[in-house]
Image: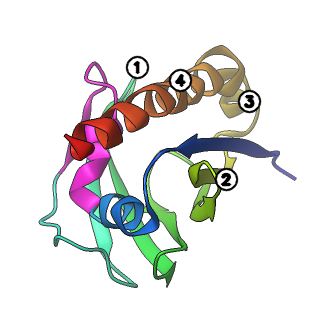
Amino acid sequence: MPKIHQLYREQIIQTDLATAWDFISSPKNLDAITPDDMSFQIVSEVPEKMTNGLLIEYKVGIPFLGQQTWLSELKHIREQHSFVDEQRIGPYKVWYHYHEITEVPEGIRFIDRVSYVMPFGPCGAIAHALYVKKQLKYIFDHREKVTPEIFAAMKK
C-alpha cells in the first residue's frame, strides 16, 4: 500500500469573509501566491469565479522530467467556506487539496489540508524524501508569507 502523505497549514489573516472568499474563489489568483521562480503556468481559460466541476490545466516543471500537464477539478464548493481541488492528471498518484476559510476574532482563518500519494513506488518515496517534501514546504511557506501582503495591499 502506498504511503499517504499529509500537509496541513493554518494561517490567520486580517480581512473579512467576503474579501477572503473573493480572492480564493478566483482561479487566476493562484498565480499571485505561487513562487515566481517555479515553472508554473495556467494553460486553460479560467473564469473569474470557480464553479463545481471546473477543470483547470496547468503546466508545471518537474526536475529531470521537464514540463508536465496538471489537470485539477474544483469541487465540493461551499460558498464563503471551502472547496477542494483534486488532481485528475499530473505528477502525483493522488492529490486532494481541501481549502477552508472561517471567521475568527482576529480575522479569517485559512486552512490548507493536502493528502497526496507519490507515484513510482520506492523511487517516488526517494524523490519525496530528497525533493518533493522540501518543494511543497517552500511553496506553502511562500504562500504563508505573501498572502497577508496581498490582503494588506487590498485595503489600501
SS label for mark 2: strand
Q: Residue at x 48, y 65 (%)?
A: 85
Q: Is residue 129 above or below residue 12?
A: above
Point out which mark residue 135 bears.
Answer: 4
Q: Residue at x 74, y 30 (%)?
A: 125
The three-letter amino acid code for the residue at tag 3 is Ala
On whether residue 63 falls in the magenta region, the answer is no
Neighbour class for label 3 at 10 Å: few (<14), some, many (≥20)?
some
Report, in whole angstroms, how far the alpha carbon at label 1 lies from the one at label 3: 16 Å
Mark positioned earlier in the residue sequence (1 or 4): 1
Q: Position of residue 98 (x, y in %)?
A: 60, 62
Report, in whole angstroms, how far the alpha carbon at label 4 lies from the one at label 3: 14 Å
Disc 2 target residue: 113
Report, in whole angstroms, how far the alpha carbon at label 2 lies from the one at label 1: 28 Å
Tags 2 and 4 in contact by the CB under 8 Å rule?
no
On whether residue 31 falls in the magenta region, the answer is yes
Q: Position of residue 80 (x, y in %)?
A: 47, 75
Mark positioned earlier in the residue sequence (2 or 4): 2
Q: Which residues are magenta?
A: 27-42
In the image, which is nearer the foreground, mark 2 or mark 3? 2
Q: Is residue 148 above or below residue 56?
A: above
Disc 3 target residue: 125
The three-letter amino acid code for the residue at tag 1 is Phe
